[in-house]
Amino acid sequence: MRPFNYLRANDAAAAVSTVSANPTAKFLAGGTNIIDLMKEDVERPTELVDISRLNLAQIKAMNGGVSIGALAKNTDTANHQLIRQSFPLLSQAILAGASGQLRNMATNGGNLMQRTRCQYFYDTAMPCNKRELGTGCGAMEGLNRIHAIFGWSDKCVATYPGDMANALYALDAVVRIRGANGVERTIPVQEFHRLPGDTPEKDNNLAHGELIVGIELPKNNFANKSYYLKVRDRASYAFALVAVAAALETTGDSIKHARIVLGGVAHKPWRATEAETALIGKAATDDAFTHAAEIALRGARPLQHNAYKVDLGKRAIVLALQRALKGGVAADLRSKEI
Ligand SMILES: Cc1cc2nc3c(=O)[nH]c(=O)nc-3n(C[C@H](O)[C@H](O)[C@H](O)COP(=O)(O)OP(=O)(O)OC[C@H]3O[C@@H](n4cnc5c(N)ncnc54)[C@H](O)[C@@H]3O)c2cc1C
Ligand code: SF4
């Protein structure tokens, strides 16, 4: 591992100004991604600014919704009474990710910022435009079984690997960010991550030195009918091949609002807006779900080794919507003693 300076920030302002002043500095939160990347020589920060003791870990009710600190641990977020009661989709998505030990360390801000799991990105002997722009993309003609079927470019076909963000997209979350001038801005989570285009080295729209301070979830009517389905290679911790965050609001038999967000298929969580619209006003039947799934996967552009994701995605959407309609594990999460 390369040598680096370690600093502990006493407040958010100091953390932001220190990282902003040094183009090769980075924040250190739970360390479960950045330290691995440094050990693999993929990331080479000269300075790590430890933000883990900043006062940004609260989870509290706000205008009928909830405000979640960037430094709240994934475990504490998933198990918090407010989240389990009103946003069970988020609890489920977080609990589908990583392992208990990792979730105890991982923070919400770090989770949003986690980098792709493309094996060529991790292997410094291979070409990778995300790691070093201009070197090419090893996955394009290589083993691309886990890669994108939507939104990829000729520069990069990687997927965003996180689970939590898929639920945040479905729940219209907003990310609160603090910049070097001390001013806070907000950005809808749907605009947080980027597609690779010609700049695959950029995962998201955060400027260097900007600090995520929190995530806000507005009030919603999805708590009774939502489900997070994750399909992966093994039941123990593994990243999603395809994931679906599904949520329904119904009146009688009819669907009033729907959310379908796919994970594991693009460089960012992939919201299937047309499929959602197709469900509005329809009876919540298997036929309607199947039709929506067809629409959701219509524009897919699979690579050599990942065409299976198209059919898998359709079936996962139908199953996730069926389980959402029944309340599924979400109901279980809500009724359990906390
Ligand atoms: C074996 C393994 C399996 C995993 N499986 C899954 C899985 O199935 N699903 C899943 O979703 N995740 C999974 N993860 C990823 C894990 O969830 C992330 O590593 C974790 O959420 C990152 O959070 P952290 O606090 O440790 O971030 P760190 O490692 O500390 O930081 C990650 C990045 O975020 C930046 N950062 C951190 N906090 C902030 C902030 N507040 N503002 C701005 N930038 C910030 C850091 O500078 C760094 O670049 C897995 C990880 C491992 C090691
Ligand atoms: S898919 Fe993206 S991350 Fe993977 S090798 Fe290609 S450029 Fe690198």
Image (tube, helix red, strand yellow):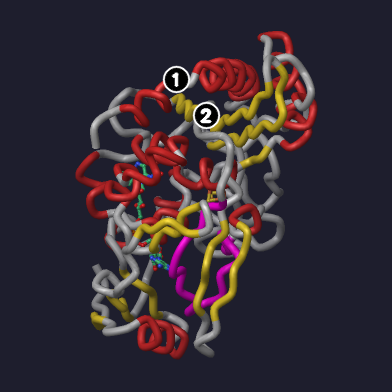
Determine which quarter of the picture holds residue 198. bottom right
Residue type indicated by callout 1? Gly
Horizontally, residue 60 falls left or right of residue 183, namely left
What residue is rendered at 62% in x and 50% in y? 156
Residue named by callout 1: 328
Number of numbered discs visible in the structure rendering: 2
300 left or right of 329? Answer: right
Which residue corresponds to the image point at 56% horizontal and 69% vertical from the top-left? 206
* Chief secondary structure of the magenta portion: loop
Please state which of residues 60 and 7 is positioned toward the viewer in this rendering: 60
Residue at image coords 65%, 32%:
303
Is the residue indicated by label 1 positioned so its CB lies within 8 Å of ligand 1?
A: no
Residue 61 quadrant: bottom left
Kind of residue sitting beneath label 2: Ser
Q: Is residue 116 magenta?
A: no
The C terminus - image quarter = top left
User: In the image, which residues are magenta?
Assistant: 201-218
Q: Would residue 242 be visible to someone looking at this image?
A: no
Vertical side of 246 occupied by 200: above or below = below
Q: Position of residue 46 (x, y in %)?
A: 34, 80
Residue 154 at x, y percent in the picture: 70, 49
Residue 274 disc label: none
**Where residue 75 sits: x, y (%)?**
28, 46
The residue that label 2 is drawn on is 226
* Crowding near the residue tagged with mark 1, few <14, some 14–19, many ≥20 C-alpha atoms within 10 Å: some
Sort mark 2 into few (<14), some (14-19) or many (20+) by Cα contacts within 10 Å.
Answer: many
